[in-house]
Image (tube, rainbow, N blue to C red):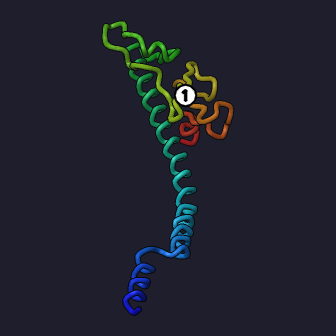
Amino acid sequence: MRQQRNTQQRQRRNGFTLLEVLIVLAIIGVIAAMAIPRLLGQQKAANKKITRSAIVSLEQAAKLYAVDNNGEPPTSIEMMLEKQEDGSPALLDKIPVDAWSQPLNYEYPNSHVDTDGPAIWSNGYGSEEKEFLINNWEDKQKK
């Protein structure tokens, strides 16, 4: 009889109780509830940084084009995709895209702000939402 009791006690100790499993799941749920919003906010900031980087790269390509063309920036992105007049390769392989895989917008002459350079912007996620508009002229206006 004692042997049977010892065997039953060992069998009970081999697994987790339902209460223990529920407590662990509750702890995991609380940790996830704290971590997920923070990670989503970082993703939005990372997408904005990626897009700003793409805008700066396009702006640099436009400046290089202007150096080769008597200081005149290209009037369209397509001009930077073509082989240069002096035989040098095109400045861009393809039209640059933002972090949401949408093509960047390019305009010269610039109608958005009073500057000599081109206007370059991304509509961001959701092409009609102005809060996601990322551009190259807001930083220039602050200076």
Residue located at (33% from left, 14% from top)? 89
Residue located at (47% from left, 25% from top)? 96
- Can residue 105 be seen here? The reply is yes
Q: Nearer the viewer, residue 4 or 61?
A: 4
Q: How many neighbours does mark 1 have within 10 angstroms: few (below 14), some (14-19), or many (20 or more)?
A: some
Q: Nearer the viewer, residue 81 or 56?
A: 81
The answer to which quarter of the image holds residue 120 is top right
Residue located at (68% from left, 31% from top)? 128
Q: Nearer the viewer, residue 51 or 9?
A: 9
Is 67 left or right of 113, judged from the image as shown?
left
The tally of labels here is: 1
Relative to 6, is 100 above or below?
above
Amino acid carrying mark 1 in the image = Gln
**Residue that mark 1 sits on:** 102
Q: Nearer the viewer, residue 46 or 56?
A: 46
Q: Position of residue 45 (x, y in %)?
A: 52, 47
Relative to 23, is 81 above or below?
above
Q: Provide the secondary structure element on which disc 1 rests.
A: loop
Residue located at (54% from left, 37% from top)? 140
The answer to which quarter of the image holds residue 12 is bottom left
Quadrant assignment for the C terminus: top right
Is 132 left or right of 73, judged from the image as shown?
right
Quadrant assignment for the N terminus: bottom left
Q: Residue furthest bottom?
A: 2
Relative to 50, is 7 above or below?
below
Q: Position of residue 90 (x, y in %)?
A: 37, 15
Relative to 7, is 123 above or below?
above
Q: Position of residue 77 (x, y in %)?
A: 49, 18
Q: Position of residue 73 (x, y in %)?
A: 47, 18
- Can residue 116 be seen here? The reply is no
